[in-house]
Image (cartoon, rainbow, N blue to C red):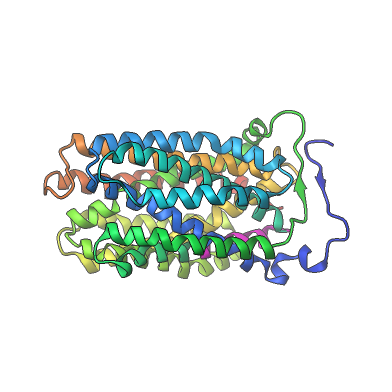
Amino acid sequence: MSAGQRTLPMALPAAARSPHAAGHWLVYGVFGLPLAMAALPLYVHVPRLYAEAGVDLALLGALLLAARLADAGIDPLLGRWSDRAASRRRLILLALPFLACGMLALLHPPASGAAPWLLASLLATCFGFSLASIAYQAWGAELGRDSGERTLLTAGREGFGLAGVILASILPLLLAADAATGLSRLAWLFLPLLALAALLTLARTPEPVARFSPAGTPGLRRALADPRFVRLLAVFVANGIAAALPATLVLFFVADVLRAEAWSGAFLALYFAAGIAGLPLWVALARRIGRVRAWLLAMALAVAAFAGAATLGEGAVWAFAAVCLLTGIALGADLALPPALLADIAESREATAGAGAYFGWWNLVAKLNLALAAGLALPLLAALGYQPGSGEGMLALTLVYALLPLFFKLLAAALAWRWRDQLEVSA
């Protein structure tokens, strides 16, 4: 079988041929909720949780960087495994115990020896999260018959994902008065939610209409031979760094610059709720002007809104809420449109690899962005004199949190505009 061939299932039921018509995009999207619930503590709460557990800030940054680099490095291999596996469902099932047990350990730091505990629990959690995410995303790319259905499937997955993020934002505050206890209880609640969502998605989502069958040269190198993918990946890198820096530092900024730590969960919930509200807007706008141009408008909105964060100081709760609202609306485009563009590339006739290989590299880059944000921003802040809760280094924190991301967002917009015609693929 040649590299570009796809195998078509025989006598596929009409409902399975159209995820859009049968509403399969809803049951497919449900599993995005617990995955996103795991992602928020993993990338947002863990740095502060372990800093309060006594891990030195520079050591914490180094451990997060090491774990995330190791995690990112295996993603392309997991993508190739996903392409060659008999069923993506089975890989998701295999990932569930690692994700569940890893999260439980990660959100319960011990009284002593927190640093090695962090590293071990991070590696287990990240393996489960990566394997499940890559198989899940590739499955979604293959389910859609055309660009419209792939955009709908992606929007459904990311919409449920944003709902999961909102739950992860507000539940720790509702479950306990202090953050550490709230995160502990969130970990226990996460387990049944993960099992229920996985059962619904795996049992009710159909097999894809077409399945890419790589042969010969490993698919990992093939994916990088696709110039459309490399261009989209470059935009994704710059845009991802712009998002990763604030994600790593937002709780520090809220606690030490705004002096509004009690509002942190509300800020996160508002940001992600605005993302859900913005999803239909960006999907509708993408139909009218194209997904790349809609994405560019979202980038412009994010830059205009986030620039104001650098001017904020103690007590600026409502002003920061406005920043969260506007950047949250822009977030909807960041979540729905780039993966939909990638899904079209992976399922087009010119695709050079299986969907798993494409999403393996995609996830590697996403995690490298987060790894670099934690591994570089935290030691940089420590070197500039910032220490959490000390009142020192506030200017450094503001500059790294609020201004540095704008450079990368503008770079992403410039690249997307330059390659706007090459990135919009009809499939």
Q: Position of residue 367 (x, y in %)?
A: 46, 42
Q: Position of residue 97 (x, y in %)?
A: 54, 50
Q: Position of residue 105 (x, y in %)?
A: 39, 48
Q: Residue furthest top?
A: 217
The answer to whether 244 appears left or right of 256 in the picture is right
Residue 155 lies within the magenta run: yes
The answer to whether 206 appears left or right of 102 in the picture is right
How many tags in the picture?
0
Can residue 211 be seen from the camera position used here?
yes
Which residue is painted at 71% across and 37% down in the image? 352
Magenta stretch prevailing secondary structure: helix
Can residue 411 be seen from the camera position used here?
no
Q: Nearer the viewer, residue 40 or 409?
A: 40
Position of residue 344 relative to residue 294, above or below, is above
Q: Nearer the viewer, residue 216 or 196?
A: 196
Residue 292 lies within the magenta run: no
Which residue is painted at 11% across and 45% down in the image? 392
The picture quadrant where one finds residue 350 is top right
Q: Which quarter of the rendering shows the N terminus?
A: top right
Q: Position of residue 137 (x, y in %)?
A: 61, 52
Which residue is painted at 63% across and 67% down in the image? 27
| Magenta span of residues | 145-160
Which residue is painted at 32% across and 70% down in the image? 174
Q: Residue furthest left?
A: 391
Q: Nearer the viewer, residue 411 or 197?
A: 197
